[in-house]
Image (cartoon, helix red, strand yellow):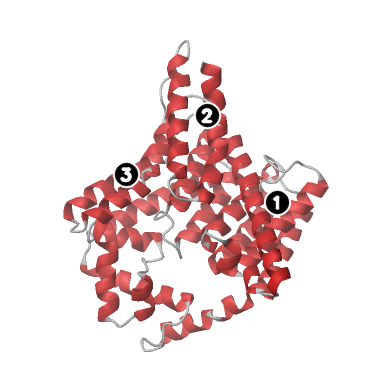
Amino acid sequence: MRGVAEGFEKWGWRLLMPALLFGGVAAGYVLLVVSLMRLYSWRSATAPSRWRLAGGTHWWMGYYALQCLGGLWSANHDAWAMSLEVKAALLVLPLVAAVPGRALLRDFWWSVGWSVSVYLLWRWANAGWIYGASGDLSHWRYAKFSGDVHPTYLSLHTAVAWLGLGAYWGGGRRAGLVFFSALLAISLGLMGSKAGIFAAVGMVVLDVVLRKRWAASARQPLWASLMFLVLLVSSAYVMSKARFEEMASARELVKSDDAPVSSSSAGRVAVWRTAFGVLGDHPFGVGTGDVTDELMVRYNEGNITYASERRLNPHNQWLQAGVAFGWPGVLLVTLALGHWFFFGWSRRSRWLLLTGALVASHAMVESVLETQRGVVFIMWMFVALQGETEGKEGGSS
């Protein structure tokens, strides 16, 4: 029976990324199965080992504790309960990874790499079919291309998938590197997520620089990295140029409060200002459940129609934490992401350093812990990489 449980756990981890892409409550059910199978395997061992939390996970668990405590000064208890459900991975995944058992790293890379690639191939086929039937090019761009997954989150998943290419999935042959590098790079350009494209470019540049400093950290050949970079920039320029041109509206809003808010870039500037105002007025936050309600009041007071119609959150994880929990929330997010990045730097771990930089880059322009496609993915990646870097037996954390 223990062998059966280990098999279910293995394929549970490998099905987690498809579950995240599928959406809904699928990821929660997969995590439940994985947790039960891992616990059963541990209890069935002849001499069960002690649980060990990965370094840095206490910051993430502390942030979840703030989510719980933040309900004490929240008026909207329904939103508080929903937040606890969505962000449960902050607590659950560190505890699951703490149970001695199967190493998490290889299943993580395998699941992310193949799942994202298959999903992107499906989106290519969908866009191609629509174009062939109607000549409509719009399905090759931005949200229509990315489908049900928001372009920013899919960009994060895609960039991470490229990091493991060749080492953990896709094989090490030249043909595989060329095909999958091209698929991932061009797809990133088609998605048109400004944050995703800038973060991916920065990731590749940093990776190339690290080759000279940490020779052992290089995985893809240099030519594959350069090809990925060229294809990413080229496809973004050709298919998503207008997305970058709209950034001028954000610059105008920075110069003048009276400038119109008519694009996602200007919208972010407007919600950042609003969130800073809330943080200034509420140094301990407005509570877990009242973030959107408080922002909506201020959007309406400031006639920020673009933000109020879309019920926008702060689109920045530090400001999200600040509006909810004040400066203690900002501090905890900083410590959690700072540990990720600096531990990777100190241990010369390519995986931790580059993924930490990617997550931090996205967190600057998106509240990445507010959806399961963000929080589950990020925590799964962290416990898998952190546990491997620490070298714990069996990948336990």
Relative to 56, is 70 above or below?
below
Q: Which residue is mark 2?
A: 9
- Residue beneath disc 3: 62
Q: Left of 276 or right of it: where is 102?
A: right
Secondary structure found at label 2 = helix
Q: Nearer the viewer, residue 206 or 396?
A: 396
Sooner in the amino-acid sequence: mark 1 or mark 3: 3
**Picture coordinates of residue 2, whole percent (x, y):** 51, 17
**Furthest-top residue in view?**
46
Cα distance between the residues tagged 3 and 2:
27 Å
Q: Residue type at mark 2?
A: Glu
Question: Is the C-beta separation of discs 1 and 2 under 8 Å?
Answer: no
Whole-percent x, y for residue 19 in the image: 52, 45
Q: Amino acid at mark 1?
A: Lys
Considering only vertical position in the picture, is 21 above or below 366? above
Residue 100, above or below 171: above
For image coordinates 49% across by 42% down, the residue present is 380
Q: Residue at x 67, y 39 (%)?
A: 168
Q: Left or right of 189: which side holds 35?
A: left
Query: Gap in Å between the C-alphas at discs 1 and 2?
Result: 38 Å
Front tag of 1 and 3: 3
Point out the residue furthest to the front here.
133
User: Which mark identifies residue 212?
Assistant: 1
| Number of other residues with Cα within 10 Å of mark 3, as a class: few under 14, some 14 to 19, many 20 or more | some
Do the residues under discs 3 and 2 have CB atoms within 8 angstroms? no
Front residue of this view, candidates 56 and 17: 17
Neighbours of disc 1 within 10 Å: few (<14), some (14-19), many (20+):
few
Is tag 1's residue or tag 2's residue first in the polypeptide sequence?
2
Upstream in sequence: badge 3 or badge 2: 2
Q: Quadrant of residue 14?
A: top right
Q: Please, what is the three-letter code of the amino acid marked with disc 3?
A: Gly
> Residue at position x 61%, y 35% from top?
106
